[in-house]
Image (cartoon, helix red, strand yellow):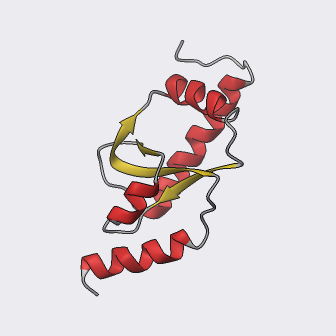
Amino acid sequence: MPEEEQKLREAAQMLRFFRNDDFIVILDERGKEFSTVEFSSWLGKSLMISKKRILFVIGGPWGFSDEIRSRADLAMSLSRMTFSHQMVRLLFLEQLYRAFTVIRGEPYHHE
């Protein structure tokens, strides 16, 4: 299937799960980069916004369609490198864990 067609099909599937009051964060190599502490601070503040859900979205092998990019509230990068979907899930989950430990006030060994 051509790249653009695949991105459009993936977008249609994603959009079915999005609600109007969701805060959408796409994980994209061209997005904003955070340190762990910066991400923790951002996440702590974001949990206080009036949106009901914060959705972190991993794109397909060709990335995101323009429609998903325009719907996203933030594009966030874990790295400028490319990772498999399985690795992104693992890396992002580990960063979420670290962020919540920082939010809880547990010591962070890099400070």
- Left or right? Give the position of 102 relative to 75: right
x 44%, y 72%: residue: 11
Q: Residue furthest top?
A: 111
Task: Please say if 30 is above or below 49.
Answer: below
Image quadrant assignment for residue 107: top right
In the picture shown, does residue 56 fall above or below 9? above
- Image check: 84 left or right of 73? left
In the foreground, 95 or 9: 9
| Residue 16 seen | yes
Residue 23 drawn at (x, y percent): 58, 48
Which one is in front, 105 or 51? 51
Count of labels shown? Answer: 0
In this view, the residue in front, 35 or 73, is 73
Vertical position of residue 77 compared to residue 105: above or below: below
Q: Quadrant of the N terminus?
A: bottom left
Q: Is 108 left or right of 34, judged from the image as shown?
A: right
In the picture as drawn, the residue positioned furthest to the right comes out as: 104
Q: Is residue 101 above or below residue 86?
A: above
Q: Is residue 80 left or right of residue 92?
A: left
Residue that appears at 53% across and 69% down: 15
Q: Is residue 64 visible?
A: no
The image position of residue 6, as x and y in percent, is: 34, 79
Where does residue 18 sit, x and y in percent of width and height? 59, 64
Residue 99: give x, y in percent of width and height: 62, 31
Q: Quadrant of the C terminus?
A: top right
Residue at 42% across / 63% down in the picture?
59
- Quadrant of res 4: bottom left
Q: Residue furthest front?
A: 20
